[in-house]
Amino acid sequence: MDMLLAQKDNRNDASEQRMINFLIHFYRKGSRPFRSLSALPEAEAVSTMKSLYVEGAVFWERFKDPYEYLCIRREVEKHLWSKFKEKGGCPQNDYPIYLVLGRPKWTMMVADAATLATTEEIQVPLSVLKEEEVSFTYPDSMVSALMVRQKDPGYYEPEYHGKVFTLKEMQQIIRKKGLPGEGWETHMPGHLAHYIEAQVWNQSTLNDYLTGFTTRSGSREGQ
């Protein structure tokens, strides 16, 4: 994960920190990015999660119980899809590809040796996406759903948890509150994913970007 622990540029002021124009997709080292477990038959998805599980890796421990994870994830994705449609979204797929907005402070704080050794990332400019094919949640959509189920008064924020936001709505929230942990101070437990998640509902757009990214990278390496 080459840039996961990159330090924030001290020259950035608060206004610059809120002008986030890229997403980051984290994926397993040695694999291809922009793939979804939800696209797989259940048996294959479970087998894949078993192979992805890494004890002690904050990014990969979520697959410890693959059957439970898959069941909850599919319920959450149905909710995301329907709520995004209600807001005028035009999902081209039944399930999204997950990214995060900007470089979250949380990922830099919790990165452990096991995660760093097994994780890669790719940045995607927001400019390559249409507004109607990307939605947002705070925090991670699985964690957001957990907050709704538990409604713990110490953590639950009903104006955000369980909600699906458009790009314009999320930009307004960031301008008002800042980024999670960077102006937007919350009471989220440290072990739970604490960032703004982006759901991209057109895998073709990401694959096209990946093809161009790979071509550009190959050209630079050949120079």
Image (cartoon, rainbow, N blue to C red):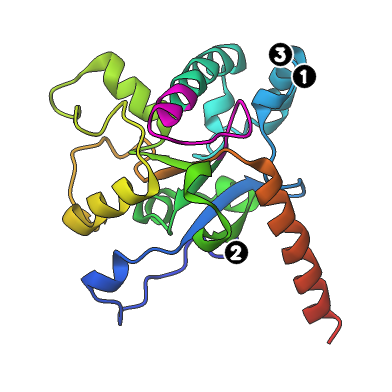
The answer to whether one can see residue 31 in this image is: yes
Dot 3 amino acid type: Glu
Image coordinates of residue 67 in percent, x first then y, are 60, 12
Q: Tell me which numbered mark, 3 or 2, is placed earlier along the sequence.
A: 2
**Quarter containing the N terminus:** bottom right
Q: Nearer the viewer, mark 2 or mark 1?
A: 1
Q: Distance between the Cα atoms at labels 2 and 1?
A: 29 Å
**Closer to the camera in the image, 85 or 5:** 85
Name above or below for residue 219 compared with residue 22. below
Dot 2 amino acid type: Asp
Element type at marker 2? Answer: loop
Give the residues in magenta: 81-97
Q: Nearer the viewer, mark 3 or mark 2?
A: 3
Q: Are marks 3 and 2 in contact (CB under 8 Å)?
A: no
What's the residue at 71%, 21% (across, down)?
Answer: 45
Element type at marker 1? Answer: helix
Rendered image: mark on residue 44: 1
Q: Mark 3 points at which residue?
A: 42
Q: Mark 2 points at which residue?
A: 2
What's the residue at 34%, 28% (across, down)?
Answer: 144
**Closer to the camera in the image, 112 or 89:** 89
Extreme residue in the bottom direction: 223
**Quarter containing the C terminus:** bottom right
Q: Tell me which numbered mark, 2 or 1, is placed earlier along the sequence.
A: 2
Dot 1 amino acid type: Glu
Q: Are marks 3 and 1 in contact (CB under 8 Å)?
A: yes
Q: Local crowd at mark 2 within 10 Å, few (<14), some, or many (≥20)? A: few
Q: Distance between the Cα atoms at labels 3 and 1?
A: 5 Å
